[in-house]
Image (spheres, helix red, strand yellow):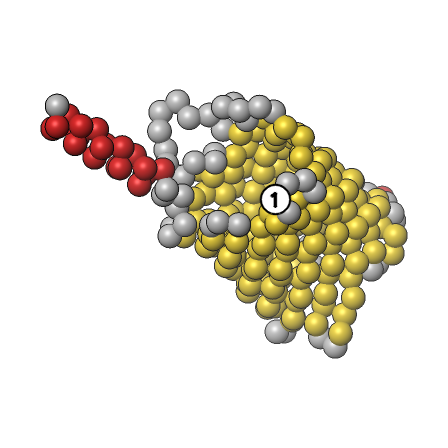
């Protein structure tokens, strides 16, 4: 009986240690593509896809698909209304039969741009309504606010540096959601195509994750074809 009890306690300890492994010490990766299609003087359509992993190139974490209709108030101000579908594996450990969380999201945002010398700034204010389907729990509707500040500095006509910080605020319990601090080196292939390679530190209330990021940005303009 004592040996059986010892085995049970040892097994419980191992399970507990595994459950605490959230992958905080692993370098994950985000591969992203962003597109913006200008369809008139005032309107454009945004679309993006992001594939995120807990480890570098493996261990699926999240697939994010998002689109929006943008209204260009001026060259320095834009309002948007959008929709996103997000599939998330919330567990770093992989096991048979695990089910992902699915989220449908509506969002509204306002973007302001300004410059100071060679430094270009972008301020994004976003509200989100999140309809979350958890297979192992109840479905919930949650609300969140986000503020994003980006600064970009051109090194020459092709190369540039960029950095941002974004804070997430829950509009229900647990006021602080997360904070993302990012820095990258970017390259302009042309006026309508650029890429960035950088590093993201993603802080949550109890965990901090390090992520390598590779992003491609594509712009199209149907106004030119119409003219």
Q: In the displayed structure, would residue 22 be above or below residue 117? A: above
Q: Position of residue 23 (x, y in %)?
A: 39, 46
Extreme residue toward the front, this view: 2
Q: Position of residue 202 (x, y in %)?
A: 52, 53
Q: Position of residue 119 (x, y in %)?
A: 70, 72
* Residue at (68, 56) in percent of width and height: 148
Q: Is residue 146 left or right of residue 81?
A: left
Q: In the displayed structure, would residue 140 be above or below residue 78? A: above
Extreme residue toward the bottom, this view: 117
Screen quadrant of the N terminus? top left
Q: Which residue is mark 1?
A: 174
Res. 103 image quadrant: top right
* Residue at (30, 34) in percent of width and height: 15
* Residue at (27, 32) in percent of width and height: 12
Res. 185 image quadrant: bottom right
Q: Position of residue 74 (x, y in %)?
A: 87, 56
Q: Is residue 187 left or right of residue 37?
A: left
Q: In the displayed structure, would residue 9 be above or below residue 151? A: above
**Numbered marks: total:** 1
**Label 1 residue SS:** loop
Res. 58 image quadrant: top left
Q: Is residue 31 left or right of residue 4?
A: right
Residue 173 visible to the viewer: yes
Q: Residues within 10 Å of mark 1 (few under 14, many from 20)?
A: few
Q: Nearer the viewer, residue 207 or 81?
A: 207
Q: Nearer the viewer, residue 156 or 54?
A: 54
Q: Is residue 183 left or right of residue 71?
A: left
Residue 68 visible to the viewer: no
* Residue at (11, 28) in percent of width and height: 3
């Amino acid at each position: 009986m004592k040996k059986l009890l010892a085995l049970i306690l040892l097994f419980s300890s191992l399970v507990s240690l595994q459950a605490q492994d959230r992958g905080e010490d692993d370098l994950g990766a985000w591969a992203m593509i962003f597109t913006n299609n200008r369809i008139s003087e005032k309107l454009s359509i945004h679309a993006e896809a992001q594939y995120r992993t807990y480890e570098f190139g493996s261990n699926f974490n999240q697939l994010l698909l998002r689109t929006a209709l943008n209204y260009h108030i001026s060259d320095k101000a834009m309002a948007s209304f959008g929709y996103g579908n997000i599939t998330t594996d919330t567990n770093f450990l992989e096991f048979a039969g695990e089910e992902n969380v699915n989220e449908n999201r509506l969002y509204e945002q306002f973007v302001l741009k300004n410059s100071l010398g060679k430094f270009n700034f972008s301020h994004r204010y976003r509200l989100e309504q999140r309809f979350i389907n958890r297979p192992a729990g109840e479905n919930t509707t949650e609300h969140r606010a986000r503020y994003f500040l980006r600064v970009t500095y051109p090194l020459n006509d092709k190369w540039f540096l960029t950095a941002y910080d974004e804070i997430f605020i829950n509009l229900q319990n647990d006021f602080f959601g997360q904070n993302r601090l990012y820095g990258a080196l970017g390259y302009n292939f042309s006026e309508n195509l650029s890429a960035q390679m950088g590093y993201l530190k993603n802080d949550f209330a109890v965990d901090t994750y390090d992520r390598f990021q590779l992003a491609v940005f594509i712009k199209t303009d149907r106004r030119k074809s119409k003219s």
